[in-house]
Image (cartoon, rainbow, N blue to C red):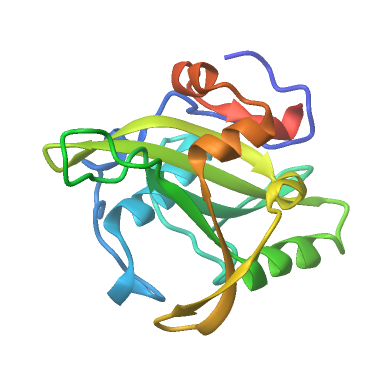
Amino acid sequence: MTENCSPNPDLINPEMKLEDIRYRVNANTCDGHGRSTASGRGYNAERLFNAIFDESGTAFRGTIDSHIDSYVPGEIAYDVEVKSCVARYQSSTNEPGRYGQFRIWKHHHDQLIAETSQYDSRTPIYFFVVYSVRLGIEKEVGKLLVPAEVVDDVLDSWSLEEHVTMGEEKTRQISWHLLLKRLGVSTDRFKSEDIINLTDE
């Protein structure tokens, strides 16, 4: 791994993938706030993020708040929102379904940016993970780190939606394919690199 010359936290285990987390202690389980409606794969994505930044590669969950799934200390620390989605939704035919989508809640998104804007030493970021499912087992397609302000620039519209625990809130669903396009990241690059880190670009 090349030496990190930026003030951002080091990517210690960028080669670690979502499927690696499946076989770790406490993986595939839902715990904490919202566990009754959560997906084990979503929680595994949070564990994956922490394992990437942990020297021992430990896969754990460290949720700080409803809009902060993890925190990485450093000269410029990260407040992190983790999002995951399937590459393609299931179709009733043999044809591939539509592209999977990330769901972003506006009040969480706004809180993430507003709270960290008060500190020069903290950066709000998103960690996006896309996976396919084969025989019930997830296999990572790709992952990337994106500053929240950059994500804010590509979210062009919001709609009201009812949430089982939050009630009616504004949300934006965006396919991972469209997100990559708006971020200027090719699908080939997304699939071939261990992780794409737009916090340094």
Is the residue 115 above or below the residue 138 in the image?
Answer: below
Q: Residue at x 16, y 34 (%)?
A: 94
- Residue 65: percent from the left, percent from the top? 57, 71
Q: Residue at x 29, y 65 (%)?
A: 30
- Residue 1: percent from the left, percent from the top? 57, 14
Q: Is residue 10 visible?
A: no
**Can you tell which quarter of the image residue 156 is in?**
bottom right
Q: Residue at x 68, y 60 (%)?
A: 157
- Residue 114: percent from the left, percent from the top? 79, 66
Along the line of sight, which residue is nearer the eye, 90 or 152? 90
Image quadrant where one finds the C terminus: top right
Q: Residue at x 83, y 51 (%)?
A: 121
Q: Is 199 situated left or right of 66 in this image?
A: right
Q: Is 19 situated left or right of 74 in this image?
A: left
Is the residue 97 above or below the residue 16 in the image?
Answer: below
Is the residue 31 above or below the residue 119 in the image?
Answer: below
Q: Is residue 178 visible?
A: yes
Q: Is 198 situated left or right of 174 in this image?
A: right
